[in-house]
Image (spheres, grey):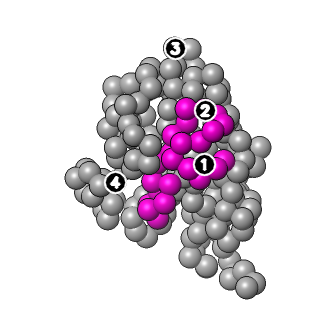
Amino acid sequence: MSMESQAGQGSDVPLALQRAGGAARSKLSVSSKNIRGAIPEEQSEYGMGVSPEISWNEVDGAKSYALILEDPDANAPKPFVHWVAYNIPADVTMLPEGLEDDAQVNEPAGLLQGKNSRGSVGYFGMRPPVGDPPHHYHFQVFALDSELDVAPGMERDDVLKAMSGHVLAAGELIGTYQQSMEPPK
């Protein structure tokens, strides 16, 4: 774990979009067939824990895309990182539902995934404490003017550092999730 990552693990840090997206030259639109405000239970760890389908508009000049999913309402770390995906090929503007949880995925070829705050690679679904008010999940997508020279399985801060100065456009989709009762065992 890099020193920068260790520093950000237990403290409040801004969302990725506020850190890397502030330098974006334009905005991009992010959407999902699965998320219309509230995030379905299927995408949570209370359900099946499968990643939702996420799509965005193509950005001229983009050489790759990156996605970072964070929950700023989590207790710790704040924000809780649920998903880091990068080197998404320039001709790909949608990640399918149920993307495999590997550092290097087969489809789309070239896509790499990093570690979430749980310490595993790939998507980790929502799991706010039962009874918490709704948490807000920020699906942040970045269009980049290059591929990132970052190994598979890296952490958010390593990816953000590599993205610095390369963000052409950025955007986000915010979904909410709340678990009001313990699911049946």
What residue is disc 2 on?
109
Report, in whole angstroms, how far the alpha carbon at label 3 lies from the one at label 4: 30 Å
Going 22% across and 53% down the picture, which residue do you hit?
3
Q: Earlier in the sequence, mark 1 or mark 2?
A: 2
Q: Quadrant of residue 123?
A: bottom right
- 17 with respect to 46 (left or right): left
Report, in whole angstroms, how far the alpha carbon at label 4 lies from the one at label 2: 32 Å
Q: Which residues are magenta?
A: 99-121
Q: Earlier in the sequence, mark 4 or mark 2?
A: 4
Residue type of the residue flagged with mark 4: Val
Q: Earlier in the sequence, mark 3 or mark 4?
A: 4
Residue type of the residue flagged with mark 3: Gly
What residue is disc 3 on?
61
Labelled disc at residue 13: 4
What residue is disc 1 on?
174
Q: Nearer the viewer, mark 3 or mark 4?
A: 3
